Amino acid sequence: MLESVLAGLKVIDLTQNVAGPFCTQILGDMGAEVIKVERPGRGDDTRDWRPPEIGQKSSTFLALNRNKRSICVDLDSADGLEILRKLAASADIIVHSMKPGSAEARGFGYDDLKAINPSLIYCAISAFGQVGPLRGLPGYDPLMQAYTGIMSTTGNDGEAPVRVAVSLIDMGTGMWSAMGILAGVIERSRSGKGVFVEASLLDTGVSWMTVFVASYLATERLPKKLGSAMSMTAPYELFRSADGYVFIAAGNDRLFGCVCEGLGSPDLARDDRFRTNPQRVANRVELHREIEALTMIRPASEIVTDLRRLGAPCSELNDVSQMLTSEQVAASRIVEELPVDGAPHHKVIALPIKADGRRSSAMTPPPALGADTNAVLSELNIDAAEIARLHRAGVVG
């Protein structure tokens, strides 16, 4: 079902790096035809983000660009702009990740393309948004983690802040963009009119800070760096075990009792310092010391087994290899093979949603640079002689 829900919709993808390609990959996984427009000779920047490589291709590019076709067009040329206008005339959705004002200056802003195709859904992804004093500046995920305050909350107290290693702002912006586009598709089905969708790394970063902002507005106290812990509940953090680490999360008093029983110290739940969550938060350091004295003498797997038997939320600390080989991840079938040239057993992370118990089966490998240029131009009724001229002129590749 998921691989066909957007069947019949054509997406023109003018994005590169992470946020935009992740957005359009989601649309492709749901069955949309995605035409990725790239710069002749260079393509998406992530094609050159290597090593690491898989089959002599950037692993980053391969992770973000399945279920797409690639054409190379010089959008700074008059002929290239005309090709884009023809693409937009027959498209349902166009997505770009250029700085605000760049597309407009080059003749393919929303108003330009809406005049050609009034039902076009136009999504603009930017760093700081379409308005404000910083609107024209570039931005990357860790830069925006710093700007939006996320980085001020990470790391351990007394130590330098660290970035969240996952590109959560980039990928989150891709998700919000896809949701905005899908909302536009629904609205167009009602009104017949196109929609201008905006998403930014700034707005995504600020939105991820929702709980921290609420806490600050309630207390006027800045959040502290707590390592793996959480400010409003305890225990809710990593503890050392005899052979690694285990994360224990007791979100209420009952679960704390289960934790204490599973660790072989039920009296700890009746300690006056730890009877309620506010008391545990106030005595966080002492609580951590008491629990870690119990966990450090036992293997993580044994702790997890005993706590899960009692219903206490916990997990061993996995690395990437351990996660990929875990029974639960295998059962979820979210890791699938997607062969590419030079890597017949290449694996990818599938669309992380299911419909009727099944994931999307759309799985075409990321395209070679310009692999579909001639085919797409032919579909625009550009004849072979003109295509040859465009190649000679360097307009397409």
Image (cartoon, rainbow, N blue to C red):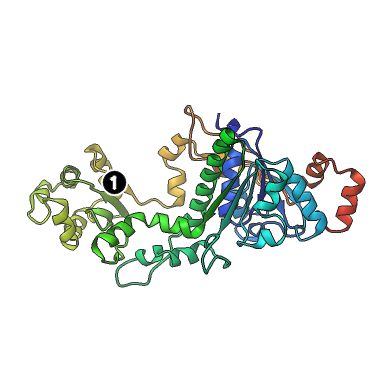
Where residue 164 appears, as percent x and y from the top left, is: 43, 60
Where residue 391 appears, as percent x and y from the top left, is: 86, 54
Name the residue rendered at 39%, 65% in the picture.
149
Where residue 30 appears, as percent x and y from the top left, is: 58, 36
Foreground of the two, 184 or 326:
184
Name the residue rendered at 74%, 45% in the picture.
87
Can residue 243 be seen here? The reply is: yes
Name the residue rendered at 47%, 28% in the picture.
357
Q: Within the image, what quadrant is residue 184 found in?
A: top right
Name the residue rendered at 15%, 46% in the picture.
264
Identity of the residue furthest to the top in this view: 356
User: Looking at the picture, does residue 322 appear above or below residue 218?
Assistant: above
In the picture, which quadrant includes the C terminus? bottom right
Task: Say what secondary structure mark 1 lies in.
Answer: strand
Would residue 362 appear left or right of 324 to someone viewing this image? right
Would residue 363 appear left or right of 385 to someone viewing this image? left
User: Looking at the picture, does residue 209 appear above or below residue 331?
Assistant: below
Residue that numbered label 1 is attached to: 314
Foreground of the two, 239 or 68:
68
Where residue 234 appears, as percent x and y from the top left, is: 22, 54
Would residue 342 appear left or right of 153 to someone viewing this image? right
Amino acid type at circle 1 is Cys
> Few, some or many C-alpha atoms within 10 Å of disc 1 (few <14, some 14-19, many ≥20)?
many
